[in-house]
Amino acid sequence: MKLPWQMLSLMACAGATLVGCASTSPTSDESPLGPGVDERRVAQVEAAARRAGVDVHWVNYPRKMGP
């Protein structure tokens, strides 16, 4: 009965170690809204919506096109 708990403990420690090693540094292509989001287009649409007096609720942000 002791062996399953030892295995579970070992797996939990291994999982915590792997999570600690995960890279958290953002790439140059990422924005606060998500990877590949065209922030300039988002700002243009939201500015136009403010001028028109309407709300924008994004389902999917526009993505950058090309390289």
Image: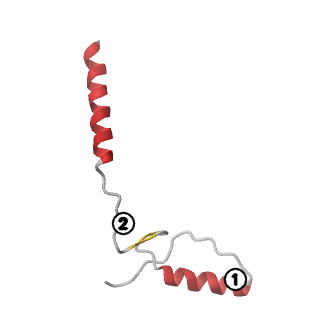
In this rendering, is residue 33 above or below 16?
A: below
Specify few, some or many for label 1: CA neighbours under 10 Å numbering under 14, 14-19, or 20 or more. few
Name the one closer to the observer, 23 or 58: 23
Where is residue 45 shown, x and y percent of the image?
A: 59, 83
Q: Which residue is mark 2?
A: 26
Residue pictured at 49% horizontal, 69% vertical? 33
Where is residue 25 shown, x and y percent of the image?
A: 34, 62
In this rendering, is residue 44 above or below 18?
A: below
Q: CA distance from mark 1 to mark 2?
A: 30 Å
Going by the picture, which residue comes out furthest to the top?
1
Q: Nearer the viewer, mark 1 or mark 2?
A: 2
Q: Looking at the picture, which amino acid does disc 2 mark?
A: Pro
Q: Which residue is mark 1?
A: 50
Where is residue 1 shown, x and y percent of the image?
A: 29, 12
Name the one closer to the observer, 63 or 21: 21
The C terminus lies in quadrant: bottom left
Name the one closer to the observer, 10 or 53: 10
